[in-house]
Image (cartoon, rainbow, N blue to C red):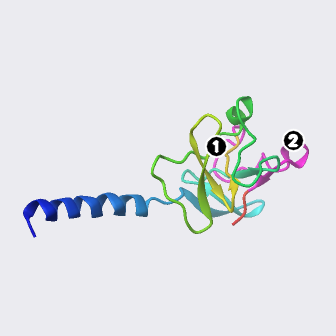
């Protein structure tokens, strides 16, 4: 093997492994609502009943109040998590096909003030 071939192979392995190691920035925490999915900062994640499997219905002002859990380009899915494309072209994490959001009115980790909002359309995301 030539030095160039070895370096090219190593570069490919490093790039591939970086993508493969990317995972959803989601954890499980216990809140007043029980076991709940939370983001990397411990903020509760929610699902929206008006979303269809793999498609967000929360755009514009809705997404200002319910910020989507953004996925970086190249993020890979697995273990029930997937990445969906939003109407604005950005990427969002979903769990079991349901897009994930935080709630702008939750002020600290563990808050669950968005659960049941909008006549029950918003729910804490459960593992």
The furthest residue to the left: 2
User: Residue 112's x, y, as percent?
Assistant: 75, 51
Going from N to C along the chain, the mark reached first, 1 or 2, is: 1
User: Mark 1 near mark 2, Cβ–Cβ under 8 Å?
Assistant: no
Q: Nearer the viewer, residue 104 or 52?
A: 52
Q: Which residues are magenta?
A: 104-124
User: Residue 32's x, y, as percent?
Assistant: 76, 59
Q: Say what secondary structure mark 1 lies in.
A: loop
Q: Say what secondary structure mark 2 lies in.
A: helix
**Looking at the image, is 85 positioned above or below residue 77?**
above
Residue at image position (55%, 50%) is 41
Return the residue at label 2. 118
Residue at image position (62%, 66%) is 80
The furthest residue to the top: 61
Judge depth for marks 1 and 2 and give the one in front.
Answer: 1
| Quarter containing the C terminus | bottom right
| Label 1 CA crowd tier, 10 Å (few <14, some 14–19, many 20+) | many
| Quarter containing the N terminus | bottom left
Q: Which quarter of the picture shows residue 37?
A: bottom right
Return the residue at label 1. 68
Q: Main secondary structure of the magenta part?
A: loop
Image side of residue 100 versus residue 27, left or right = right
Rounded to the nearest whole Å, what is the CA distance between mark 1 and mark 2? 17 Å
């Amino acid at each position: 093997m030539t030095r160039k071939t070895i370096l090219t192979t190593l570069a490919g392995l490093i790039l591939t492994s970086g993508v493969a190691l990317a995972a959803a920035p989601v954890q499980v925490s216990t809140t007043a609502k029980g076991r709940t999915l939370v983001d990397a900062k411990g903020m509760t994640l929610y699902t929206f009943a008006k979303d269809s499997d793999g498609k967000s219905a929360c755009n514009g002002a809705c997404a200002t109040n319910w910020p989507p859990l953004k996925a970086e380009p190249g993020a890979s899915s697995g273990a029930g998590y997937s990445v969906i494309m939003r109407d604005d072209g950005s990427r969002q994490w979903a769990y079991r096909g349901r897009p994930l959001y935080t709630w702008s009115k939750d002020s600290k980790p563990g808050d669950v003030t968005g659960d049941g909002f909008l006549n029950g359309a918003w729910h804490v995301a459960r593992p």
